Image (cartoon, grey):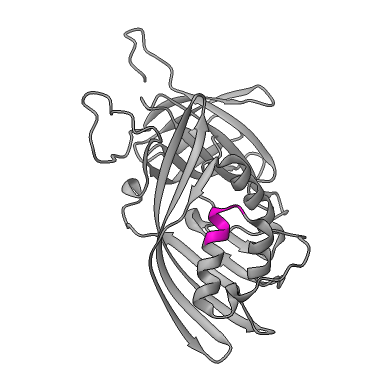
Amino acid sequence: MLELVVRSLLVLALGFPSITIASDSSDPESAIRRMIQANAEKDLPTLSQLMAHDADIISYAVAGRKYIGWAELEQGMRDEFVNAKKLEIPIRELTVWTKGDLAWYAMELDYIRYMQEGAEVKRTVLPMRETGVLERREGRWQLLSWHESFRSANLGGALSSSSADSRERHPGQSQSSTEPDVSGTWEILEVEDDKRYQATLDRNGNGQYSQHGGRFTTAKIAGRLWEGTWHQSGNDREGGFELQLSEDGTEAKGIWWYTRVGKQKNIPPREHGGTYHWKKPMSPSGIAR
């Protein structure tokens, strides 16, 4: 699947050398704004300094992602910064409360990603909200934990996508983002192993597939972004997937990964898996089934 999965807004880094951040974190609001700026600039050392490095810190991102400590965040951070051609993160609202050496905040922002797709650059806007807690340590404010979500309860309309070159829409295409119909039969290829099987899904993107008693469960379809989970009862494995739908909704490409293999749990998401190519077979009349 295309590496678009909505990732953690405050992606983090491991093992960067210690540096000094002058007055950027001398008060909690400055620290928060500096983190957002560093995220947009893909400035890993600064992000590392502005985040607490406690191993037991728990934070929550969109699409049900849970991060414990630093190890689970590193791969997501590296993938996001490598795959995104450009990031913009304008803050819409920010309110901060402080009591002694603790501070907490509520924030609304837009997470804007530019992705290279062939000769075209795609612009994706995610309207987000976030809450978090900071602590002052040795005179510098650091983020302890955070939780993010979409501002819209309607996840189908939470993501808008357009070309960075502001190309015109196709004739008849709605100006508003509508959730695509992913129901029907899909032919699935696991690219690395050349493994092929079929899935039959309902309109909500849930259904069975012909691989070890597998079942797909869709968590979100937003614009052309499709995210969810898979479970295989036949070999007792499960994980997640992230796809990017084609404009006509008949193909999808992206990635899949493990989160559990038998009794082995808490496998860091997106670290172990492969790539997908989904395609709807065509009927003799040329209509996707």
Position of 11 with respect to 138 (left or right) is left
Q: Is residue 136 magenta?
A: no
Q: Nearer the viewer, residue 9 or 35?
A: 35
Q: Residue 233, located in which quarter of the rendered image?
A: top right
Q: Residue furthest top?
A: 284
Position of 112 with respect to 38 (left or right) is left
Q: Position of residue 92 (x, y in %)?
A: 36, 63
Q: Is residue 206 visible?
A: no
Q: Residue at x 61, y 32 (%)?
A: 275
Q: Position of residue 146 (x, y in %)?
A: 53, 69
Quadrant where the C terminus is found in the figure: top left
Q: Main secondary structure of the magenta part?
A: helix
Q: Residue 23, located in which quarter of the rendered image?
A: bottom right
From this view, report whether residue 188 is shown above or below residue 128.
Answer: above
What is the tally of numbered marks visible in this picture?
0
Q: Nearer the viewer, residue 64 or 245?
A: 245
Q: Position of residue 231 (x, y in %)?
A: 57, 43
Q: Residue at x 54, y 51 (%)?
A: 7
Q: Nearer the viewer, residue 245 or 230?
A: 245
Q: Magenta segment range?
A: 37-42
Q: Position of residue 53 (x, y in %)?
A: 70, 70
From this view, report whether residue 176 is shown above or below residue 196.
Answer: below
Q: Residue furthest bottom?
A: 100
From this view, report whether residue 197 is shown above or below residue 272.
Answer: above
